[in-house]
Image (spheres, grey):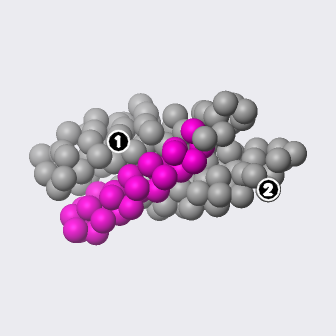
Amino acid sequence: MNHVMSMLKTHPRDTGSLDPAVLAECIAACFACAQSCTLCADACLAEDSVADLRDCIRLNLDCADICLATGQVLSRLGTDLSVLDELLEACRAACAACAVECEKHAGHHQHCKVCAEQCRRCEKACADLLAALGRR
């Protein structure tokens, strides 16, 4: 996350009253979750029980796309707050759903356990940023 903080500190646009550490954590969590979900989906496809993991794969891919988009938008300071609010809420919801599904498989598939942990981290980071924005 250090590079995210460095970029935020050197950005000519100020984060305003928002704590840059909260924003940086959310950006980093979104990108880490997107990567974990993509890797988890790929690992699920390599499992012998791939048919049993169909919902997990779909949620992994949806979550990865939503987290990636959220991280990218958060990286552009000055986004309309109503748009940001909806995007963060969508990301939080996608992460929660993906975590629940991955947790179902975590006992048999370590990649699902790791993915669920990253989803929970991102879910919390989105909730924290929403709270810091005074939105939820």
Label 1 secondary element? helix
Q: Residues within 10 Å of mark 2 (few under 14, many from 20)?
A: few
Residue 85: say if magenta: yes
Q: What residue is disc 2 on?
A: 51
Q: Residues within 10 Å of mark 1 (few under 14, many from 20)?
A: many
Q: What residue is disc 1 on?
A: 125
Q: Residue at x 80, y 52 (%)?
A: 50
Q: Is residue 76 visible?
A: no
Q: Is residue 101 left or right of residue 67?
A: right
Image coordinates for residue 82, horizontal then vertical, percent? 22, 68
Q: Is residue 133 left or right of residue 35?
A: left
The residue lying toward the viewer, choosing from 67 and 41, is 41
Image coordinates for residue 97, horizontal then vertical, percent? 49, 52
Q: Main secondary structure of the magenta part?
A: helix
Label 2 secondary element? helix
- Residue type for callout 1: Ala
Q: Which region is colored magenta?
A: 76-103
Q: Is residue 121 visible?
A: yes
